[in-house]
Amino acid sequence: MVEPVEGQDALRHRAEQLQLGAQQEVLAIDCPPYFDSPTDNPIEFQLLARGVECRVLYDAPGLESSTRMDFVMRCVEAGEQARSLPSVRMKMLVADRRCAMIPLSFEATESTAALWIRPSPPLTALVTCFDLLWERATPLAAARATGELDDRDRELLALLAAGAKDAAIARSLGLTPRTMTRRIAQLMTELNARTRFQGGLQAARRGRL
């Protein structure tokens, strides 16, 4: 179920093998240390070009470099789904939810050894961990595109969180039903919320209300 991988060359080879073998989805948690350039991952662009979904969760301090952030946004523009958390001090790479790699130590200052994990309860636990962290994280594209919410959006989200109906929200904000529906859909996408009530809660959780 679990196989140790040691040495820079072996780590690089296994990481490439895992990504190139993906047919549907790659999940990754990204934070230092890196054994290759943090602003160069040509394999991901290949995956995105052939329709493989790539979801990457970034450790926010690792994005403070403008060079790093510019690279990440190029990935987003190519189709990567990117989110960040204030602190997520672990690394993970999962392909099609059937195999994964994690460092042997999350506290190591350099990448020298990892664990290759095949279908098993530990793999299920890792994927569950990723999904839970993903739900808590902030979408990078939305954060950059929208910046701070204006007063009308805050009021709209507050009304959603309160469970107000469409007609009441439209009247309160002085919007036409079509304009209100369109703006709600945009906010729901930015907040990765499946229901309107969840959209209000997500906004509150992220400090937007």
Image (tube, rainbow, N blue to C red):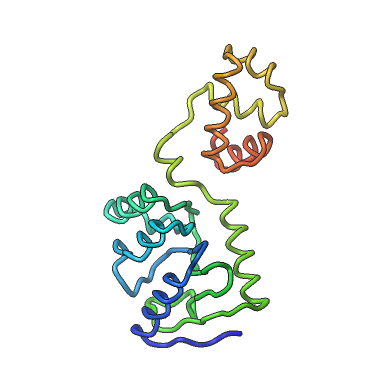
- Direction from residue 10 to residue 29 in the image, left or right: right
Residue 33 vs 190, above or below: the answer is below
Residue 56: in sight, yes or no? no
- Direction from residue 53 to residue 127 in the image, left or right: right
Which residue is nearer to you in this view: 11 or 24? 24
Residue 205: in sight, yes or no? yes
Q: Residue at x 57, y 19 (%)?
A: 178
* Count of residue discs: 0
Q: Residue at x 65, y 19 (%)?
A: 169
Q: Position of residue 114 (x, y in %)?
A: 47, 81
Which quarter of the figure has residue 193? top right
Q: Position of residue 17 (x, y in %)?
A: 42, 77
Which residue is nearer to you in this view: 157 or 184? 184
Q: Position of residue 1 (x, y in %)?
A: 61, 85
Residue 193 vs 120, above or below: the answer is above
Check the image and name the residue furthest to the left.
Answer: 67
Q: Position of residue 68 (x, y in %)?
A: 31, 56
Q: Residue at x 66, y 29 (%)?
A: 160
Which quarter of the figure has residue 5? bottom left
Q: Residue at x 61, y 74 (%)?
A: 123
State which quarter of the image contains the C terminus: top right
